[in-house]
Amino acid sequence: MSISCDMLVFGGTGDLTLHKLLPALYHLHRDGRLHSDVRILALARKKLDRAGYLALAERHCRAQVARGDFSVDTWQAFAQRLDYFAMDASQRGEFVRLAHHLGSGDRRVRVYYLATAPDLFEPIASHLESAGLAGENARIVLEKPIGHSLESARAINAAIGAVFAESRIYRIDHYLGKETVQNLMALRFANALFEPIWRAGHIDHVQITVAETLGVENRGGYYDHAGAMRDMLQNHLLQLLCLVAMEAPVRFDAESVRNEKVKVLQALKPITGMDVLDKTVRGQYGAGQIGGHDVPAYYFEPSIDNDSDTETFVAVQTEIDNWRWAGVPFYLRTGKRLPKQTSMIAIRFRQPPQQLFRETPLEMIDPNWILLSIQPEESMHMEIHVKQPGLDMDTRVMQMNASFVTTDEATLDAYETLLLDVIEGDRTLFIRFDEVEWAWRVVDPILKNWAVEREYIPTYPAGSWGPADANRLFDSDDQAWRNEL
């Protein structure tokens, strides 16, 4: 059971809170993972009383929680923890009201979860301090993206760091809370089987794909200023790359794990100048069909400018310039309005050095793969060659499948895991600022190059796998994007 604390969620009526955070906290309550004295206070500008907010929260939790997991009795008990406070977080004077509402309690752990636009991070931190709400037992949680460039990220960190020590700042990337992502570290570092082959000389290339069928939905105002590079690649995909490529930490604690991730980001070869044209592809979805339904082009989505040049798809080829990975290309891609919702790490191994099984033509020898599915399922698949039944000595590919969760195991979702870690003060799965800084150093030169080339952005039909030009990133003709497990 976690410790006693107050959790204050700024942006309490937003999609993140209603669709992710409250259902996650409900699950933690249901499973007995929250201390009996944990209190949850949602804060937002909407003029609601507590009863009105509880009705809103219940409606959304019922929609997000599986029908068999939602219990009226459990909800009523959970609702006893939940309260609402209407305030404008941009106004300093509102925090005096908040302090009065909270009363004395400096000795309690207070978690401030900023489920808000990034431009509110700095004023909220400053106002918390001015109202005496940022004592040494206070922790602050920041949602991605941290800034929109290296310069803005540094400014945000300086402002937050002036109020909260680094040890009390939790930069959240919900992908790091997913079971498969955590299992990637267990797969690599708890099994001597993989260590000798997890390197250049054995691995041909690595692909990391995060594909979404959805468009911008009601996030158009934010997304049109962010795009796929800032929204997904700069954080989620680079974090996954770090976990694939990092060296074993000296111990499994927050600083040791994060030290190794930073080393990977530092070793990424810069993509600048003409390399941006050769190593990156961007695109924007046009009209098309997904699941048999017509969907509009990006520039017809709500809150999007008709002449927007924002990318909804990005693919990058990059390389890690260190001893383990030199010469191994990493291919990263992410996009909206793609044919299926999936997040996958695909690791392709090199072909055997000699063709022994001559009954199988060389061109039919498929490579070995390790496929890590992050969503919608959380599992690992290995593709290996076995003998084809019969008299001839030829081979076929067999897929060995392993789910990371058995049917009788109750697992925590990503936000459940991360919220519990914040309450308990475990920062292992959170991002240190130098990780944010090095990630921006990777993508900033690309974004600046694209900003010069604003006249034209390629389009791809909704329901396709993105611009066909993304295929030119591969180093050889026998490499191609892996779209299925």
Image (cartoon, grey):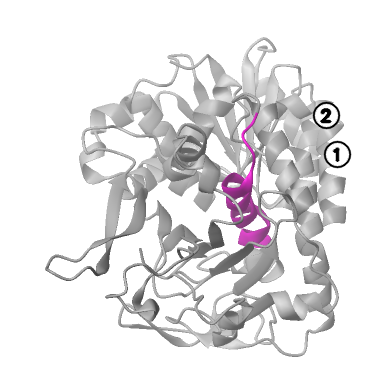
Q: In the rendering, at what x and y percent does residue 21 appear?
A: 48, 40
Residue 89 visible in image: no
- Kind of residue at disc 2: Val
From the viewer's perspective, tell me whether residue 294 is left or right of residue 394: right
Residue occupying image coordinates x 61% and y 34%: 248
Task: Give the magenta part as a residue range.
Answer: 230-249
Q: Residue 339 or 23: which is nearer the viewer?
A: 339
Q: Residue 464 or 297: which is nearer the viewer?
A: 464
Q: Which residue is mark 1?
A: 159
- Please tell me in which quadrant of the rendered image residue 473 appears: bottom right
Q: In the rendering, at what x and y percent does residue 351 appear?
A: 46, 66
Quarter occupied by the C terminus = bottom left
Look at the numbered disc 2 and give the secondary structure of its residue.
loop
Look at the numbered disc 1 and give the secondary structure of its residue.
helix
From what the image shows, is residue 335 above or below residue 435? below
Q: Residue 367 or 306: which is nearer the viewer?
A: 367
Residue occupying image coordinates x 76% and y 23%: 134
Q: In the rendering, at what x and y percent does residue 112 appear?
A: 65, 31
From what the image shows, is residue 121 above or below residue 464? above
Kindly identify which numbered label has been placed on residue 163.
2
- Residue 245 counted in the magenta span: yes
Quarter occupied by the N terminus = top left
Residue 240 visible in image: yes
Residue occupying image coordinates x 44% and y 32%: 25
Distance from disc 1 to disc 2, alpha carbons, whole Å, reads 7 Å
Residue occupying image coordinates x 86% and y 76%: 273
- Kind of residue at disc 1: Ala
Marks 1 and 2 close (CB-CB < 8 Å): yes
Mark 2 Cα within 10 Å, few/some/many (few <14, many 20+)? Answer: many
From what the image shows, is residue 360 above or below residue 299? above
- Residue 33 counted in the magenta span: no
* Total numbered badges shown on the rendered structure: 2
